[in-house]
Amino acid sequence: MRLAIIEGRKAIAHCRPNPPVGCVLARNGQVVASGYTGAPGQPHAEAMALQNLLDPSAEVIAFVTLEPCSFHGRTPSCAQALVKRGIRTLYVGMIDPHPKNRGAGIDILKQAGAEVVVGLLENEVRKELEAYLWRPDNGESL
């Protein structure tokens, strides 16, 4: 997850209003692909990591700092992309507090049979993403 946090930092300069999410795909303990949130309308971290995966048939474990999005907005659902790719194990730093998501991405993955572990390095992830997350007091990120 620490590598996913580092990957997410690459997005800080261009990702707003989206949070700077990082994703790492690993196989047999080795990183095989990674990604980070693109500019608005560009691939999210999970989609970029899946695009960067050289062996699409490889069974991989995903580490993502923020819950994958469950809905199709400017980009397709990352949760659905992970399901389509056949990701069976996913570690998530924290649940996305945005009302359109808030656990829905996790539900999509679990309903597809994936094992999802939430809260890996959550405090570190929250510190990285805090200024970018949806807030109920203003309805948007800061």
Image (cartoon, rainbow, N blue to C red):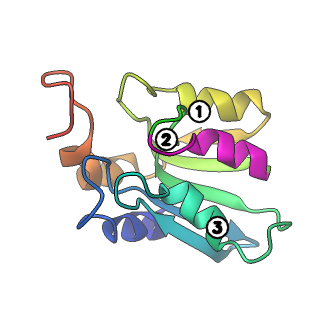
Q: Secondary structure at mark 1?
A: helix
Q: Could you say which disc has been placed on residue 128 in the image?
A: none
Left or right: residue 106 versus residue 140 is right
Q: Quadrant of residue 98?
A: top left
- Of label 3 and label 2, which has the lower sequence position? 3
Badge 2 is on which residue? 67
Query: Any magenta on residue 86?
Result: no
Residue bearing the label numbered 1: 106
What crowding class fits label 1: few (fewer than 14 Cα within 10 Å), some (14-19), or many (20 or more)? Answer: many
Q: Residue 40 appears at what percent x and percent y?
A: 35, 53
Which residue is pictured at 35% across the width and 60% down the height?
39
Residue numbers of the magenta segment: 74-85
Amino acid residing under circle 2: Glu
Please say whether residue 87 is visible from this viewpoint: no
Q: Is residue 116 visible?
A: yes
Left or right: 65 as drawn, with respect to 112:
left
The residue sitting at 59% across, 32% down in the picture is: 106
Q: Nearer the viewer, residue 34 or 30?
A: 34
Question: At 59% from the left edge and 65% from the top edge, which residue is drawn?
Answer: 49
Of helix, strand and loop, which mostly describes the magenta segment? helix
Give the mark, 1 or 2, whose residue is nearer the N terminus: 2
- Which residue does the numbered mark 3 point to in the structure image? 51
Between discs 1 and 3, the one toward the N terminus:
3
Mark 2 Cα shell of 10 Å, populated few (<14), some (14-19), many (≥20): many
Residue at 69%, 73% (x, y): give it. 29
